[in-house]
Image (cartoon, rainbow, N blue to C red):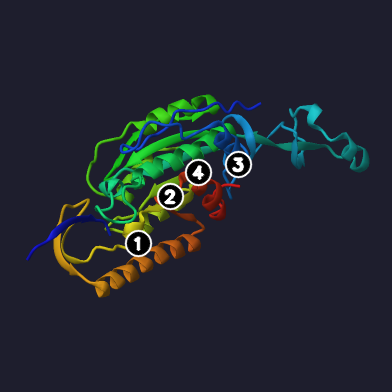
Amino acid sequence: MNSSTAYCCPGKNTSNYRGLEDATHDDRLIFDSSFLAKLEQLHLLSRKLFHGKYHAERRSKRTGSSLEFADYRNYTLGDDLRSVDWNIYGRLDRLFIKLFEEEQDLPVYFLIDTSASMRWVPPPGHASAPRSTKFDQARRIAASLAYIALANLERVNIHYFDAELGDHMGMSRGKGQFHKVLDFLKRVPGQNGGTRLLPSFRTFVQRVKQRGLVFVISDLFDIEGCEEALSLLRYNQFETSIVQILDPAELQPTLLGDLRLVESETELQFEVTADQSLLKRYQREMEGFLQGVEAFCLRRQINYSQASTAIPFDDLVLRLLREGSIVK
């Protein structure tokens, strides 16, 4: 049998930044001043309030002495008399202390999938070739969201993962650290097996002590599934958002005939004869998988967005992620 071979997988300074480049494209500026100015108008959404370390533009549940009133409590010996509400004392003849909410920063973490399936490219002849890989798209989305966080004085860290949790950037804060973000994202790690969400996330929750927002940017192509891994993040009090990145060739493959399919992460090979009936069956399975992920996220109050390599990343950030309640 003659077979072709394909690879498959189941005062604001907004100066220009030289950013990430595709391996197949020329060097160009992808973060120009107009795009950065749009990002600075956005905020990352959080249902929870987390304790931070530094003053920022987000209020935490920790009470302190900022301008935002929170509540009262009874006066106890040793309290600062400047915090007494003397108006209430005049009416009730009782001493109450005014409490205020502190405006503090929010830890924001990015978990970026670097596995082989994220670096997969469509076979020659497919309409989506030669677009950016899913990994390229993931890095650009992460950079955009990181800039939003840094512009709002949140603290940002980026972790790579595949079969296990890999390198991380280290906590950074302030727009001046955006170059550090880009430098880290330009360093493409070596591959270390396929996607294994659960052991990677288990290491993450053990390593990271301060809870906050977590953005998982991945195709979620883990043979063990993603539900237990995402539940682990939720159980450990991280507010989780998923950006699932897919290529059009994965959603609607077009190759027909006698094929040798090579699974991108395990290197397992399968010889198949692809006809329209098989393609329709594949599409049904893929739709079921995606609908299952979205339904699970809805049940667990996990923000979910689906991103395509066919859509410019700036449009994804400014439009789709808003629809997914990730930014506003």
Disc number for residue 42? 3
Q: Position of residue 186 (x, y in %)?
A: 36, 32
Which quadrant is home to the N terminus? bottom left
Residue 145 placement, left or right of 114: right
- What residue type is disc 1 on? Leu
Disc number for residue 8? none
Residue pictured at 82% horizontal, 33% vertical: 84
> Label 1 belongs to which residue?
251
Q: Is residue 250 positioned above or below 84 on the image?
A: below
Task: Report helix, strand or loop for mark 4.
Answer: helix
Upstream in sequence: badge 2 or badge 3? 3
Residue 144 placement, left or right of 139: right
142 and 110: which is toward the camera: 142
Upstream in sequence: badge 4 or badge 2? 2
> Label 4 belongs to which residue?
314
Tag 3 near tag 1, CB within 8 Å = no
Q: CA distance from mark 2 to mark 3?
A: 25 Å
Q: CA distance from mark 1 to mark 4?
A: 22 Å
- What residue type is disc 2 on? Leu
Q: CA distance from mark 3 to mark 1?
A: 31 Å
Task: Report helix, strand or loop for mark 2.
Answer: helix
> Label 2 belongs to which residue?
233
Residue 42 placement, left or right of 108: right
Q: Is residue 317 positioned above or below 166 on the image?
A: below
Circle 1 Cα neighbour tier, 10 Å, few/some/many (<14 / 14–19 / ≥20): some
269 and 75: which is toward the camera: 269
Upstream in sequence: badge 1 or badge 4? 1
Task: Report helix, strand or loop for mark 3.
Answer: loop
Task: Report helix, strand or loop for mark 1.
Answer: helix
Q: CA distance from mark 2 to mark 1?
A: 28 Å
Q: Is residue 277 positioned above or below 13 on the image?
A: below
